[in-house]
Image: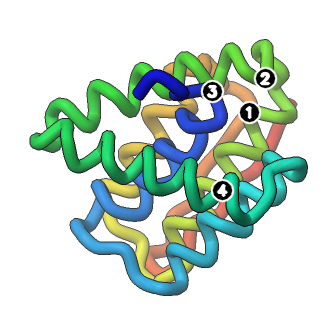
Amino acid sequence: MANWSQDHDLVYLFMCVSFLADGEVDDAEKEAMRGNVKVMLPNVSDDNYQTMEDAVLEKFVSLGSDDARKEQYKHSLGAVHGKYDGDDESLFKVVKNLAYIARADDDIHENEVELIETAVNVWKMNDKISLMNTGSSLFVDYNG
C-alpha cells in the first residue's frame, strides 16, 4: 500500500464498523460510508473515493484475521487523530459518522459499539463524548 494515506485510515475505520462488527456490509452501510466520506473529505471525487475504498478493502482482506484487522483499526485511529491534529470537534464528527454507519442497517451490533468505544478511548474523549445504545439506534452526544 505505497499510496496509503490518513484518508485511507479514515475509510478503514468506517469499513471496520461496517464489516468487522457483524461480518457483512449491506447497501445502507455502503451508502452511509460513502456519504460520511463526502462529509469528512469533501474534496475527494467519486473516482478517488472508489480507488481508496478498493485499496482499503484489499488491505482489510489481506490482513486475514479479525485480530490483525483490529490492530490495524487501532493504528488507523492514531493516524486519524493525527490527521485532525487532535481537534476534538473533528474527532467527534468521526465518532458521529461511525455511529451513523453502525445504525444504517437498523441493528446495532455489540461489536460496532465496542469499536466506537475504542475510538473514544484511544482519542481520550471519554469525558467529552457519550454514547447511548437503544439496541435499534446509537446516539452520540458531545459534551466538549
Q: Is residue 129 shown above or below 20?
A: above
**Which picture quadrant has residue 90?**
top right
Mark 3 is surrounded, within 10 Å at the Cα level, by few (under 14), some (14 to 19) or many (20 or more) other residues, namely: some
Q: Provide the residue designation for mark 3.
A: 6
Q: Is 120 in front, or is 94?
A: 94
114 on left or right of 130: left
| Alpha carbon distance from label 2 to label 4 | 19 Å
Residue 72 located left or right of residue 130: left
Give how far apart the Cα atoms at labels 1 and 4 are. Answer: 20 Å
Q: Is residue 87 visible?
A: yes
Mark earlier in primary sequence (3, 2): 3
Q: Upstream in the sequence, badge 2 or badge 4? A: 4
Could you tell me how far apart the alpha carbons at marks 3 and 1 are, in whole angstroms?
13 Å
Q: Which residue is mark 2?
A: 84
Q: Are marks 3 and 1 in contact (CB under 8 Å)?
A: no
Q: Quadrant location of the N terminus? A: top left
